[in-house]
Image: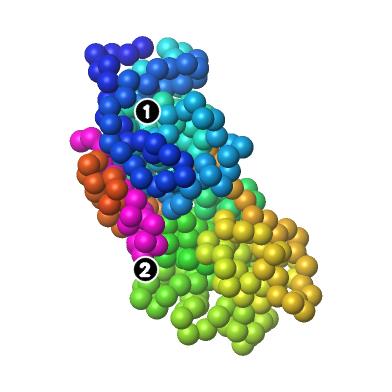
Amino acid sequence: MATTSLPTTIKAVLQPDPKSNHLILTTTPLPKLSDPQDYLIQVKAVCPCLDELTWEVKFPQLFTSSRERVPCTECAGVVVDGPADGPFKPGDEVFYRNDAWHTGTLREYSVVGTPYLALKPKTLSWTDAAATPLSALTAWQGLFEHGTLDKAAVHGDAAARKKNAKIRVLITGASGAVGGWAVQLATAAGAGAIVGVGSPSKASDMRQLGATELVDYTTQSVDKWAAENPAAREVDLILDCVGGPSMGNCWGAIKNGGTFLSVVGQPGASKPEGETKTLAKGEWFLVQPRGSDLAEIAQLVDAGKCKPLVDSVLPFEKFAEAFAKVESRKTNGKVVISVSN
């Protein structure tokens, strides 16, 4: 199915030792397709993820020693080869998030399975598309799969919008990469109220994304904010994107019988002593790479209802600087590495 001559070797970034965050730029053979559902992608742009260079040490059971240790799980690029009877064809512009234990995408060509792929939103640049998969999937699955919002509402289902209009949602880190997507998706789904927790410097950003109420965590904790008027301020659904003391404070805002989700840790482990509320669901969930979800997200992006948050874009050769920026935890959105034009 390949339509162009391909190189035999490519530039790739490797992590030689999983116990060290040191990365090197080297040359490796062009990856081969070993599964009938695999596609070969010419990589345009990728995104590093916070702490990803430590994952193999933290979760050794997920990784095999035989794989090439190439970082970055999310990518935007062009299909160059794959199954003749598959849903994608050479020249298709795609984006995806791969499983963490697969060889990553910080190289000129990468391999991905059919279930992970979706057509890139037509309205997004390569760098914006690369900044989308992980954050958008996390927010999407948190709100609609693990949470209580009905995703049919984002496609105009009137009954779903009526249902969602009764749900109050609170999102911590609401101006960040995942939290920003969650605010936008909750807005698109017609949530009755969207409480954004963030710093005052991001207040206008959170409002613009769709937050209807704001909590300035620098001057007031969530529990104290909720305690001022519990009947009006308690929420049905919490999506915590921060963890730490902030997650414990959120117990003061959840309704008895509510749903409390986190992408950082178990909500139950942060329950304050003496707190008597019970939850319908309290869960730490991990995002699942899923092309079908990305296809729905792409529709919303192209409809102008959502967009990624991008902090900065760096060229391929500045990959180490890109990882350092991510690990600084001081970025305003995603850091993108441009691999090719």
Which amino acid, mark 2?
Asp
Which amino acid, mark 1?
Ser
Residue at horizontal 25 percent and vertical 18 percent from the top: 7
Residue at horizontal 52 percent and vertical 53 percent from the top: 139
**In this picture, is 316 found above or below 49?**
above
Q: Nearer the viewer, residue 328 or 296?
A: 328
Crowding at mark 2 (Cα within 10 Å: few <14, some 14-19, many 20+): some
From which residue to which does the magenta span run? 323-341
Residue 110 is tagged as 1
Mark 1 secondary-structure assignment = strand
**In this picture, is 1 found above or below 208?**
above
Residue indicated by mark 2: 205
Drawn side of residue 326 relative to residue 142, left or right: left
Q: Nearer the viewer, residue 336 or 327?
A: 327
- Residue 92 place in picture, x, y as percent: 34, 26
The C terminus lies in quadrant: top left
Drawn side of residue 300 relative to residue 159, left or right: left
- Residue 314 place in picture, x, y as percent: 24, 48
- Residue 131 place in picture, x, y as percent: 37, 47
Residue at horizontal 32 percent and vertical 20 percent from the top: 29
Viewer can see residue 158: no
Q: Nearer the viewer, residue 267 or 325?
A: 325
The quadrant where residue 30 appears: top left
Residue at horizontal 40 percent and vertical 47 percent from the top: 21
- Identify the mark nearer the N-term, 2 or 1: 1
**In this picture, is 177 found above or below 103?**
below
